Every structure is written in structure tokens, then in C-alpha cells.
Image (cartoon, rainbow, N blue to C red):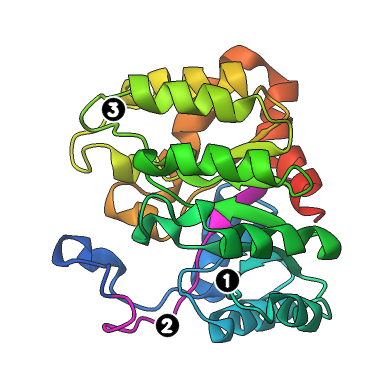
Amino acid sequence: MTIDSHQHFWFFDPVRDAWITDEMAVIRQDFLPADLEPVLKANGIDGCVAVQAAQSEDETLLLLKLAEAYSFIKGVVGWVDLQSEKVYDRLEYFSQYEELKGIRHIVQAEPDDFMTRPEFIRGVRQLAAFDLTYDILIYPTQLKAALQLVRAVPEVNFVIDHLAKPYIKDQKINTWSNFMVEIAKHPNVSCKVSGMVTEADWKNWKKEDFYPYLDVVFEHFGPDRLMFGSDWPVSLVAADYEQVKGMLEEYTKRWGDEVHRKVFGANAERFYNL
């Protein structure tokens, strides 16, 4: 299968979704499976992984309901309160849903040391009992804490969303690169090649802007731990679906068909047990 490992659905709520600023007005609307399905078909994508965009169990249940209704949604990365003393019970409740493959917290909105809190580490550790993965959504300033987390919980499989949002627009790479190289040394960590266009100059990016960052993750994570994600519909503020997919396809040409097969599907299938 060809898989988009990272996209979102939502019923737009101006209060909950206040992160969508005026300059992102193009995504201030509902985005649902009926909107995405023809886009996936037009781009040769067989299925996708729906990832939470709000911190609530209601959001998780919505995504699971959509996955039951639409066969092209192959898996869900939801949310539970990983710091709760009842996290095991909540994970046990959600284990009835075969489509739930992983959990994510919007850590980019938290303090830089959030992932080093004992209660958070304890919660992440519980994921192993249910064969669930964890998506790490952070900014580069939080990479140090991410490194501590993956060291502390080797029994859980992690994936870095959006390459940890490097400062592509400002062409800053060194500190980000140093931490990514260290994180990549841990075999339980993968990386999503996603969300890059929104870290670049939205109106004036060119594909070469991304190559230095792609060089780092392809060299250090290798072709078995990278997966394509569109970050649709957030990506629409800077590019259409075809542009996002096409940029990565062009880059991977140098690596050959087998690497393309892995990055555009096989790795996501294996990681999320789709």
C-alpha cells in the first residue's frame, strides 16, 4: 500500500482551533474524509493515518468513528491524558478499537522540559502494554527532552513528527541536526517526512530549501525508519497535496524504487501495524 502517515480531520471550532491564525484562513473550515478521499485517489495514495489535532478523548472517538466508516483511513493516532493516574484504564478502554494505533500529545505547546516529567514518562511507558506507538510533536528547542524520553522508554516505538519542525525558513540547521543525529541512534525511533512546507517561506519556498534537512534524516534514520506524511490540511497554507508529495518523490529518486516503496508506504504499514 501507498500510505500517507500523517493527516488531520476536524469540524472547525474558532475557540478550540485558535492556533489557526488569520494568515491561515484557507484552513478555517471543516475538513472531513469526503474532502480527502478524492485527493488521495488523484495522488495514488491507498490509505492514510488520521492524527489528533485536539487534546480530548472526544477527538479520539471522532477519529475512530471516521475510521470505521471509511476504509481508506487505515489507522488513528489519538489522545489520552498520559499524565493521569488512570491512564492505564483509559488505554484499556480504547484497546477495543482496532483502528487505534498510537497516541500523541501536542507537546509543541508545552514547556521545553514537559517530556521529562516523571508522570509523563510513566504514561508513555504504559503504551507498550497495548502495542501502541507515540508520535513526538515538538519544536527544535524540545529535542533535548525528546532524546531523554526515548532513552528512558526503549520499549515504546516513537516517531518524530514533521522532522521536529526545523527552522527551514531561516536556514538554521546545526543544533537541530546534532540532536536529530543523536535521536536517530535509537532504533525504536522513526521520523515522518512531513510538515516541511509550513516551516519554510509559505509563498516563496523551493524544493532545494528542504534538501539539507532531508539529507540529515535520510543519512541517519535510513530508508527503513522514514515515512511520508502530507500534514493535510495544515499543509494547504503553503502548498497543495501534489506539491508536497512531488517534492519528496523527486528527492527520493536518487535512492531508487525500493526506498520509494518503503518511505511511501511499507514503513508506515510496519510501524503502525496497519
Q: Residue at x 26, y 74 (%)?
A: 18
Q: Position of residue 141 (x, y in %)?
A: 35, 40
Q: Position of residue 192 (x, y in %)?
A: 56, 41
Secondary element at image label 3: loop
Give the Cα distance between marks 1 and 3. 41 Å
Query: Magenta stretch: residue 5 in it?
Result: yes
- Magenta span covers which residues? 1-17
Q: Residue at x 21, y 38 (%)?
A: 201
**Residue 206 got which mark?**
3
Residue that label 1 marks: 83
Tell me: residue 1, above or below residue 211: below
Give the Cα distance between marks 3 and 2. 32 Å
Magenta residues, dominant SS class: loop
Asked if the residues shown at circle 3 and circle 2 are in contact, with their CB atoms under 8 angstroms apart, the answer is no
Camera-near label (1 vs 3) is: 1
Outermost residue toward the left in this view:
22
Residue that label 2 marks: 11
Amino acid at dot 2: Phe
- Choose the circle earlier in sequence order: 1 or 3: 1
